[in-house]
Image (spheres, grey):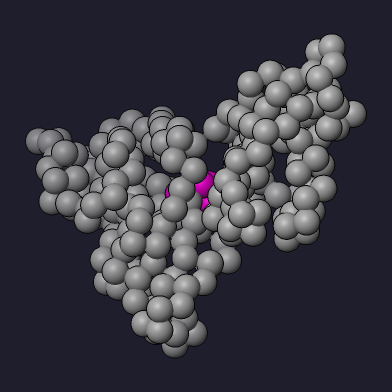
Amino acid sequence: MSRWLTDRPIDVGRLLAGVASPGAGGTVAFLGTVRRSEADGAVAAIEYSAYEEMAEAEFDRIVAEAMARWPDVRVALRHRLGVVPLGEASVAIVAAAPHRADAYAASRFLIEETKRRAPIWKKERFDSGQSRWVEGTPGGG
Amino acid sequence: MTGATAGQGAIRITVRLFASYAEAAGRDVLELSLAAGATAADALAAVRREAWASRVPPSPAVAVNRRYAAGEVRLADGDEVAIIPPVAGG
């Protein structure tokens, strides 16, 4: 699909291989996964949609910011669009650095900025067949 | 100022809608003709004249040419504006 977005299950192993290097002492992998809670009800899947052209550009900016703040960290990020079943990952972020502190920090930054800024939306799909837009976070950039 | 018919300097812009806004509007794009010097806020005001737009909050996030923009940002002919519903990525 593009650099950051995919409509297929995320291959986390491949992302990890992509950031591996002899200099990396700590590698962090974060997965955002579709879950079901008491409050959410019988969620069977979440359907993700995006303003794709802007999401690409916004991820370019977010990743560039991470690389500027943590120059020794190698990162990879994939956000999945379309229907993501319960338990599967909607987003994967990997960060590899000489020391784990920077890997954790960069990973945290990337997920928080993704949640705050990426023009992506989600619709819950229930076992019943009904669906409902999830109320998001206002703000953006 | 808004909704100007083709006049000298009028600019044409595209407004893209997404998610719950597109669903409420029954479409995902609108074409607007605005006066020269129009801003993102002017585009938003034009969109608010549609019935479905009552669900858009007082200060929604807006993008111009794929970047978040403040209301005062001036638009140019051919610009792409988007009204961004509260985001839920990640």
Nearest the camera: A27 or B82?
Answer: B82
Residue A93, visible in the rendered structure: no
Question: Could you tell whether A33 is left or right of A126 in the image?
Answer: left
Q: Quadrant of the N terminus of chain A?
A: top left
Q: Is residue B3 above or below residue B18?
A: above
The x, y position of residue B79, in whole percent, is 63, 24
Question: Could you tell whether A13 is left or right of B13 in the image?
Answer: left
Residue beneath the point at 44% across and 40% down? A52
Q: Is residue B3 above or below residue A42?
A: above
Nearest the camera: A42 or A127?
Answer: A127
Location of residue A5 by image quarter: top left
Question: Could you tell whether A20 is left or right of A9 in the image?
Answer: left
Q: Quadrant of the C terminus of chain A?
A: top right
The x, y position of residue B57, in whole percent, is 75, 56
Residue beneath the point at 64% across and 59% down? B24
Residue A116 drawn in magenta: yes
Q: Residue furthest left?
A: A22
Q: Residue furthest bottom?
A: A38
Nearest the camera: A138 or A72?
Answer: A138
Residue A141 drawn in magenta: no
The x, y position of residue B17, in whole percent, is 60, 46
Residue B4, visible in the rendered structure: yes
Residue beneath the point at 21% across and 49% down? A27
The x, y position of residue A131, in whole percent, is 47, 73
Q: Which residues are magenta?
A: A114-119
